[in-house]
Image: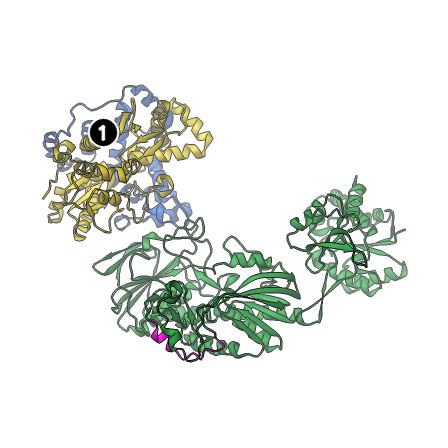
Chain colours: A blue, B yellow, C green
Amino acid sequence: MAAGMDTPPSRLIRLLQLGHAKRALQAQAIWQCVSCQTCATRCPKSVDCAGVMDALRQLSAERGVTTPKQQRTVLFQKAFLRNIRRNGRLNELELIAEFKFSTFLHSRSLSFLFKDATLAPQLMKRKKFHLVGEKAHDRAVVGRIFARCMDNSLL
Amino acid sequence: MNLAYYPGCALHGSSNDYEQSLRACLETLDVQLREIDDWICCGATAAHSLNQKLAVALPARNLALAEGKGFREMLAPCPMCSMQLLKARKALAEDEALRRSVSKIVELEVRGDTQVLNLIQLFETIGLDRLKAAVKAPLGSICAACYYGCLLTRPASVVEFDDCEQPRSMEKILEALGGKTVDWNYRTECCGAGMTMANEQTVLDLSHKILSNAAAHGANCLVVACPMCHVNLDMKQVNIERHYGVRHAMPIYYLSDVVGLALGFKPEALGIDRHFVGKA
Amino acid sequence: MSRIGVFICWCGENIARTVDVEEATKQVAQFPGVRCALNYKYMCADPGQTLVRDKIASERLDAVVVASCSPHMHLRTFRNAAQLAGLNPYRVEMANIREQCSWVHPDRTQATAKAVQLIRLSVEKARRDHELQPIRVPVTRRALVIGGGVAGIQAALDIANSGYQVVMVEREPSIGGKMAGLSETFPTLDCSQCILTPRMVEVGQHPNIRLYSYSEVEAVSGYVGNFNVTIRQKARYVDISKCTGCGECWNVCPLKRNRSEFDYGLGFRPAIYVPFPQAVPARPVIDPKTCAKLIRNGCGLCIKKCKAEAINFKDQDKLVEEKVGAVVIATGYKLYNIGKAQDRPGLEGYGEYGYGKYKNVIDSLQFERLISASGPTVGELKRPSDGALPKSVVFISCVGSRDNAKGLAYCSKICCMYTAKHAMLYKHKVHDGQAHVFYMDIRAGGKGYEEFVRRAIEQDGAQYYRGRVSKITEENGKLIVRGADTLAGEPVTIEADMVVLAAAMRPADGVEQLAQKLNVGYDEYGFLLESHPKLRPVETSAAGVYICGACQAPKDIPESVAQASAAASKVLITFSASELTREPEIAKINEETCAACFACVHACPYHAIEQAEIRTPRGVFVKRTARVNPGLCMGCGTCVAVCPSKSADLEGFTEQQIYSMVESLV
């Protein structure tokens, strides 16, 4: 992924070493990262670079310093978490709906809103489309777990 | 053989063809799967990207649910789930204070007694000899590029499975089933993971490289053991073809698909007809 | 009654600033047995020493306590001063009131009180000091050099040219070590064999050097000046005294396709072979693992051809005894194994580089052989897979070095230099070729070294990228090298014809077992331990055993040669007198009370205690006893601790002394 990143991982770590946390938190790179874990596997100093990226993502979201370019990814992850908080398990249809809606509110892009709409009938044909998603039975405990872990108002 | 089963959201969602094929195989191989009662999502990418505590807690609850019913082993066919479960299990084993606090958060005592297996490990536990003996239709026409993706072998210190540079566990299974495999260069390169919806271009770029390299090394199909990889390589293949103006026409099989075919199942029984890319 | 003189040093301000030396002197003068107590600014200086000597004479002192710095600094100084005044030097004690008092305690009152206590202890000790005489041991003025690489060769020649006999033991069939396999050496680009082989010949022909090639050290016993060494001469199956080196045998050998060890697997050799043409001794050896005659009694063509009747398939390993007075260990290095197979937990190899999988990914020593004029491709750079001339070569530094995760934490020191050398030699051979070097840092600290690396970059066009390589794969005969250029801030992908990996330098195989035979310490990597990294780099904890070259730490040829001469000079110091003196503060066993349980024999880390018999002059057996060998004992005191009958005691640190010191405090 480094080829497309504005700030490759080595430079991100360097910024953190120098104390320039703000610049690191605003790098596009942290939301471009796909968490493939290759970085940590290669590092001769056993720096958990993938873990650093996770931490940067969490901090940037908590501090609300994510940039417009990053919003699609940020909104997706947030929508995902809200979804499992509600249902205990992922409801794909709900997720897609919420994600598409929130990105539309942000970018007003109709093309993105309707992108891959043709997938719906294809998935239905293949019995992969669930109108009513699965839910965990004890959803309340999921809500409590979330509450205990996320003590700042992220969602 | 009797073990707990953690399907994860994907296998009960749009990747239910994976569940179909693995249930078919495993029943024939005398493996009883007991779905964990009231399991919850492992958190996937969203949890570890947004809240580290949650990323440990959600899998921990599932570990507790399994060990609470006395299961020594659980199958987690999705590598994201299995990796998160293993990561939580390791973190709790190494930090007693963490284990106690997470147990409180998830309202269940988590001891980490249950081992987590991915599908390849389960087939290895069943034994290549047993698999070989059960083969009814050797995979003569299959010349597969085995694709491992990221989380089956990485991070190595967490998953402790196979070799993260030159893995061979899937190839060994395929060869035991009478299939051929190719040596190719993208076995552990990322397909784009969870960026399918939010950042499709990443998936198209990375998955295109994978499909191209497999073809360049003579494969006529890919074999995967991850529902996310399957979606990116199978469902998105038409988008890749459109974007790059190439025709890949590369069927993507789950590992349980090829095992099932070798065991004599018809493709429809395994859900292969529900893939997006059919046999050429 | 004791007549002890106490001398308290100010050490300028170092002690006097914190310890009230006047007060201390007053208190100390009251101690029983103290005849006189005084203080002075610099006891170690001439006037201070004169003071001690004068007082010994005028007060007829029978023991001296100097309260000053650590005994490491000046114990010898004061002992010499005492000796000059006619007092036995082992009745001199030092109380360390500097490093152990004034330098670590800020409170004046407390420091002064502690200083007084420390002096009280020393006074108690001095009261019971015996007069001891240094131990004299004879010296066998012959040296053993283990290892025939450039370091061993240098050490052997220095010692031999000084007139002493040297026994050299080399594990391989020929001496020369790794240097014999190099192509050219930095920073001069001298042909390696051209500068080494004259030395090798000198060793082979030197009247003072007895060379045991294809041999290993089996066992060592004894102590400095008096070592007994057992050497195993491995079976060559060729009698080198009869063999003329004519070459008929290896020409006729039908088994020509054995991977050559000297070429690191890139070339071939017959089953009967000389490792390289300039070998010393230039005599063949038969490989028992591949020779048809030895395995299944077949072939035998060589013995038919041998006019000198030198081949003997019934040859066996021979054990030879040699007596030497000093040992120099120069066992050299091996390269880190880049593949999966590792001989140490914590090492993992670099699967991502495809070494072992892709034929054209080789390590640095293999590259040396490929470019060497006497190498498997006769100096033409032919890549291993298809013999093609590589037009693009990637050199990767730090493979296994500076890697805490799956390699070795240290820097191997020579790789930056030899990588630059490789890039230059490559360009000299392939004028239209391109060298790419991936590095983390450039270590070029020697004389002319920095300029050398700049030459590679500025004159020979090597492209340097600051960054590591993540993965190497092969597509259509090309090696795809994916790395980073952190200075440009972007990834870099090179399509190369060949990749050379600068693998880490590790101590040679078997060095740990050898070190145990010689009671020499080694670190977690197997590098042999020097006595002091700055001031005693070639001595070890074992008296009479010296180390030099890469077995101590990664180093290049100039440093190895320098260190070898340093080790030789230490050997010559050992040989400079016909007798060696050793400090007499060693263990002593009361043979009357010894119960012969031999717990001490087992406990002694230096194997310095023997089981002895006491017999009457007529030879009648009286009893068994443990007996300390005064040449070997290092005075550690372990035997004293384990002896159940309190028969073992330490001269200069007797149990009586220790008890009375403790009692004096209570």
The amino acid beneath tag 1 is Glu
Residue C636 in view here: yes
Tell me which residue sits at (32%, 57%) in the image. C356
Indicate left or right for C128 with C210 as reference: right
Q: Secondary structure at mark 1?
A: helix
Residue C186 in view here: no
- Chain under numbered label 1: B
Q: Nearer the viewer, residue C168 or A82?
A: C168
| Magenta segment | C239-253
Residue C531 lies in quadrant: bottom right
Indicate left or right for A67 with C53 as reference: left
Q: Residues within 10 Å of mark 1 (few under 14, many from 20)?
A: few
Q: Is residue A4 above or below residue C292?
A: above
Query: Does the magenta-highlighted stretch encompass residue C248?
Result: yes
Indicate left or right for C405 with C69 as reference: left
Please provide percent x and percent y for residue B161. Answer: 33, 41
Please provide percent x and percent y for residue C204. Answer: 51, 77
Residue C3 lies in quadrant: bottom right
Q: Nearer the viewer, residue A78 or A40?
A: A40
Please provide percent x and percent y for residue C299. Answer: 35, 69
Q: Nearer the viewer, residue C346 or C663?
A: C346
Q: Is residue C85 above or below residue C194?
A: above
Q: Main secondary structure of the magenta part?
A: loop
Please provide percent x and percent y for residue C25. Answer: 83, 50
Query: Does the magenta-highlighted stretch encompass residue B61?
Result: no
Indicate left or right for B249 with C603 as reference: left
Count the marks: 1
Q: Nearer the viewer, residue C354 or C419?
A: C354
Mark 1 lies on residue: B27
